Image (spheres, rainbow, N blue to C red):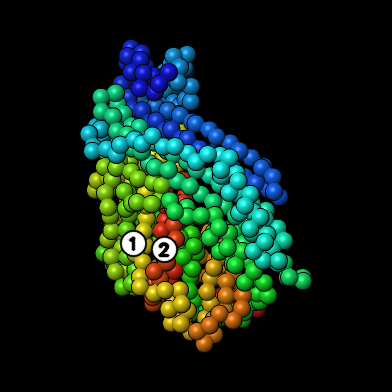
Amino acid sequence: MIVETFIKNFIPLAERAGIGRLRFYVEKIEEITVTVFEGDPENIEISILERIFIEGEWQNKVGSAYTEILAASAYDEIIRTICQTAECGEKVWQYCDLKPIELLPVQNQTFKDSEVILSDLLKAEKLAIECDPRIVNVSECRYESNHRTVLLTDGKVSLQDDCGVAEIFMLKVTAKEGEKVQSCYRRFLMGDLDTFKKYVEQTVKSAVEMLGAQMVPTAHYAVILQNTVVSELLEAYIPAFYMENVNSGMSCLCGKLDHKIGSDAVSLFEVPLMEGTGLKRRFDDEGVQTQFKTLMNSGVLKIFLRNEHSLKDGKSTGNGFKLLYKQPVTTGTTNLVLKKGNFSKLDLIKTLNEGLIITDIAGTFAGAKYASGEFVLIAKGFQVKAGRIVGGVHQITIAGDFVKMLQAVRAVGNDPFTLYEGNRTITAPSLLLDQLKISGT
């Protein structure tokens, strides 16, 4: 049964059971995954998932249910579940009525042939080994592509977004020289003209260059945070921009609206219709139209993000999103973009002159706290002396504060990297900071 017919036939049955104000959230994901290991195919998987989350008002309270079974046989169970969850809960209806929005056309996407992808991955794995004799292992060589669409309807107004196609290439290699061993894992969002070859070469280069890495003395250093690191840090601190966290005192940005929280070089935007990220949204998961937003302008905090469910004041900014289709709406983002600068990688290194380049961090889940702004993270990278890279650095810890980090930005690179996290992306360039605390020897 197609989803439109499923919804059309379900509505009168639910209404006869006393359920009103129905709203349907439909997510469809078409995905292909290909993995190779040691010269052989490890996994080829093609899947199509279509699932529905349904909310309705029963006896003045809101109940919900979800299903992946688009058949009339599921109707009775869905109705029972909505009534039971309403009876047991205290949630009341908070949605505004859906309003028509100019929508993106849904494209008939054609995936790349899985056999072609498999052949390209096998070549990529072989290339990684052959790129440098010090590469001894390729523990992950994987490709994922997904096409996601979202339908939101109350049976009268229907909003549908084609979120686009995202292609991801993941590679992990290990380099060894004598007793020295270094690994490098990279996850790339691929553009239309990108090839596996350039990403293989980048990953191999990063692993090999770290051989011989040493610790450095504990001190404050001027540092370059590589674009991949900046994207990861921003991803960890996105919740600090959510009004619900500000209202509850769980944000390091409390009381800082219209205050300068970063240097003049720092501007941060949300671009829901950004090209090239595999994600576009004209409306959020509550049916509110999305819009381009300036979160920070030349270091000044301009806005907090809201959704309809978490408001105490103001109106939704179009940032109500689900982490998973069967979960309630929370605050979220689409495409966050830290404005790039004019400095090339070489320019940043020359300007740094003496200090460290941080290329990898670990532990943001536990070590980067958006409530306090503090972070303590395991890291590695390179040491720079007299404007030149002189060797690798590992077994160090970086520590600081998110706001102070933004205020310490002296120069911004022209090398944006996009971190793809399924329902959102974060694009950021490399940043040169005046100082950051490094714990080493």
Q: Looking at the image, is 324 positioned above or below residue 424?
A: above
**x and y percentages locating residue 42 in the rendered image:** 67, 42
Residue pictured at 28% horizontal, 55% vertical: 293
Element type at mark 2: loop
Tell me, yes or no, if residue 83 can be seen here.
Answer: no
Mark sitting earlier along the chain (2/1): 1
**x and y percentages locating residue 114 in the rendered image:** 56, 39
Badge 2: residue crowd in 10 Å (few <14, some 14–19, many ≥20): many
Residue pictured at 35% horizontal, 73% vertical: 342
Instruction: Determine the residue located farthest toward the right in the rendered image.
Output: 178
Residue flagged by tag 1: what amino acid is it? Leu
Q: Which residue is mark 2?
A: 416
Residue pictured at 41% horizontal, 58% vertical: 427
Question: Which callout, 2 or 1, points to the residue nearer the camera?
Answer: 2
Badge 1: residue crowd in 10 Å (few <14, some 14–19, many ≥20): many
Element type at mark 1: strand
**x and y percentages locating residue 125 in the rendered image:** 64, 54
Residue flagged by tag 2: what amino acid is it? Pro
Horizontally, residue 105 falls left or right of residue 441, namely left
**x and y percentages locating residue 275 in the rendered image:** 35, 51
Viewer-side residue, 364 vs 113? 113
Q: Which mark is residue 268?
A: 1
Q: Looking at the image, is 307 positioned above or below residue 265?
A: above
- State which quarter of the image contains the C terminus: bottom right
Q: Looking at the image, is 280 positioned above or below residue 72?
A: below
Q: Which mark is residue 433?
A: none
Q: CA distance from mark 2 to mark 1?
A: 13 Å
Quarter where residue 338 is shown:
bottom left
- State which quarter of the image contains the N terminus: top left
